[in-house]
Image: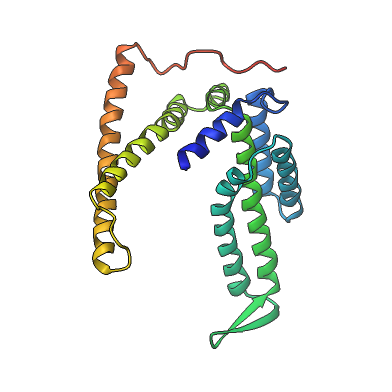
Amino acid sequence: MVKESYLMVDALAQRDNTFTRMDARVKVLLSVLALAAVVGLPGFKLPLFIFALTSALILAIRVPFKIVAGRMLPPVFLGIVVFLFMALFHQGSQVFSLEMLGLELKIYGEGLILGTTVLLRIISSVSILLCLSLTTPVHELGYALIWFHIPRVIVEILLLTYRYLFVLWDEGMRIRQAQAMRLGYPDWRNPAGWKKAVNSTSTLMAMVFIRAYDRAENTFSAMQIRGYNGDIAGQRYKKTA
């Protein structure tokens, strides 16, 4: 499921439309400026406006809802937790109170405003990065980062991480299927089942880590044999239409 989601995002970034034909450097620059404005400027009107703008862009390029939801829900959940924490514990003028399980929960006006601002900033920032990933292939993003003089080692790590994310995912799924065939994940309704499942999960994580290290060593040796010197070959970036 995770692998198919990432592959679908990559396929969307490869489609031909107005936004994918834009120069990757322009998109990176606009994304950085938008993030700086969302995080640095006070108030919640700008984050709300940028979120509306990015939502319109996502609708325009017809991104499936499950992709948007899969990437937006985790940070939105975190933002909701921060919102509730600020609304309950940021001292100020009390707006109203709630009785829940014998406890009185006081909601403060200043906390509501601050929590709403933080929540909108999180949502807006994630939507900006989502738009960038949906309209810019990873290799073009790497070329753009090099043009902006981002250290090549960072760009190299970014590209290799993206490439081998799918490889390690496949490796982990094969190990998990082998464990499941050997009853490594039994009934979860009893303590013994939980203990065995935790042990299987720990083994899976250790095996993926070891195989990731081995694959990294083999990849580095293969790249050295082929004369890799840290330079990314190929077209620098797509020409502007």
- Position in image of residue 37 (x %, y %): 69, 44
Which is more toward the observer, 120 or 40? 120
| Looking at the image, residue 220 lies above or below residue 113 | above
Residue at x-position 61% and y-position 40%: 130
99 lies left or right of 222 = right
13 lies left or right of 230 = right
Residue at x-position 47% and y-position 17%: 232
Name of the residue lying farthest toward the bottom: 102
- Position in image of residue 15 (x %, y %): 64, 26
| Looking at the image, residue 105 lies above or below residue 37 | below
| Looking at the image, residue 133 lies above or below residue 95 | above
Please identify the quadrant where the C terminus is shown: top right
Name of the residue lying farthest toward the front: 181
Residue at x-position 61% and y-position 45%: 68
- Position in image of residue 199 (x %, y %): 24, 55
Quarter of the view holding residue 29: top right
- Position in image of residue 13 (x %, y %): 60, 29
Which is more toward the observer, 140 or 182? 182
Which is more toward the observer, 17 or 129? 17
Residue at x-position 26% and y-position 68%: 191
Quarter of the view holding residue 132: top right
What is the tally of numbered marks visible in this picture?
Answer: 0
Quarter of the view holding residue 137: top right
Q: How is the image coloured?
A: rainbow
